[in-house]
């Protein structure tokens, strides 16, 4: 059973999501929060598998709530999906930096919402390659941000793992990486997994962020 926490300041939105999710035999909504403070408190109490987090809420917003939940050692297994009205929200890249596993646009089709919840619960990042490229090209070049992992060191990676990490950062899928490097998709996936383990990345989304912070890739470099 996938246990979900809903965090959105609009009761109607929460009710719609709850009706959709609770109708599935393998998903259960365990709590609802109307603001970030409540989301953090309820996450600590219920320890959900997935949090669907509205990024714009009064008081403590979804970004700060994501930061607090991701930093809680007791919630390392909890994955956070940001809910946004716009596909390129200005806060999305920062949300990925502080621990979100991806995002969904609020008007996404029901089948895509369900697929996304199941994918994140299984440990995947909810970022399509195309959206990754556009998102980072738009926002990753902004200065002033502090690194998400100050201790980040690429010395423990092999040359091939660094190469693969750069391609992940550019938004390529495992299949696209395999084609570019002339290896099998399984081999590409293995390199991605090893890089994540060595760097302590929560998921593929955080590996994308690390690639930019380490200077392995910059917007538009594959164009």
Image (tube, helix red, strand yellow):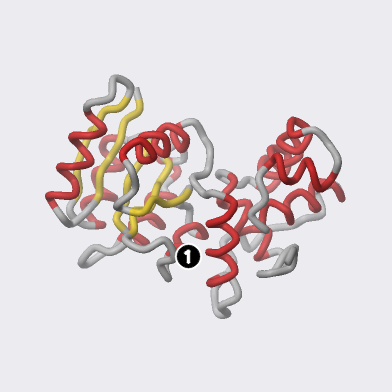
* 97 and 46: which is toward the camera: 97
Residue 195 coordinates in the image, percent (x, y): 72, 44
Residue 120 coordinates in the image, percent (x, y): 46, 38
Q: Residue furthest top?
A: 25
Figure check: 7 above or below 18: below
Q: Residue furthest left?
A: 11
148 with respect to 165 (left or right): left
* 171 and 97: which is toward the camera: 171
Residue 89 coordinates in the image, percent (x, y): 40, 67
* 54 and 68: which is toward the camera: 54
Determine the residue positioned at 49% across, 45% down: 126
68 with respect to 143 (left or right): left
Where, quadrant-wise, is the N terminus in this rendering? top left
Where, quadrant-wise, is the C terminus in this rendering? bottom right
Figure check: 69 above or below 29: below
Q: Which element is circle 1 on? A: helix
Residue 20 placement: quadrant: top left
Residue 95 placement: quadrant: bottom left
207 with respect to 156 (left or right): left
Determine the residue positioned at 60% across, 61% down: 133
Q: Residue furthest bottom?
A: 143
Determine the residue positioned at 33% across, 35% down: 48
Residue under label 1: 94
Local crowd at mark 1 within 10 Å, few (<14), some, or many (≥20)? some
């Amino acid at each position: 059973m996938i246990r979900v926490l809903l965090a959105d300041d609009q009761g109607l939105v929460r009710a719609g999501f709850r009706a959709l999710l609770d109708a599935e035999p393998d998903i259960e909504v365990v709590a609802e929060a109307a603001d970030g403070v409540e989301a953090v408190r309820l996450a600590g109490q219920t320890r959900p598998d997935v949090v669907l987090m509205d990024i714009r809420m009064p008081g403590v917003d979804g970004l700060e709530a994501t930061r607090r939940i991701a930093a809680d050692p007791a919630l390392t297994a909890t994955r956070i999906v940001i809910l946004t009205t716009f596909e390129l929200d200005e806060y999305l890249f920062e949300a990925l930096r502080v621990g979100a596993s991806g995002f969904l646009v609020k008007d996404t089709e029901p089948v895509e919402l369900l697929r996304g919840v199941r994918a994140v619960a299984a440990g995947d990042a909810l970022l399509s390659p195309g959206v990754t490229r556009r998102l980072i090209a738009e926002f990753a070049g902004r200065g002033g941000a502090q690194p998400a992992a100050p201790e980040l060191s690429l010395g423990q990676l092999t040359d091939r793992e660094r190469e693969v990490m750069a391609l992940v950062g550019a938004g390529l899928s495992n299949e696209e990486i395999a084609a570019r490097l002339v290896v099998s998709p399984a081999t590409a996936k293995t390199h991605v997994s090893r890089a994540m383990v060595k760097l302590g990345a929560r998921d593929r989304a955080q590996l994308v962020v690390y690639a930019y912070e380490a200077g392995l890739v910059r917007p538009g470099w594959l164009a």
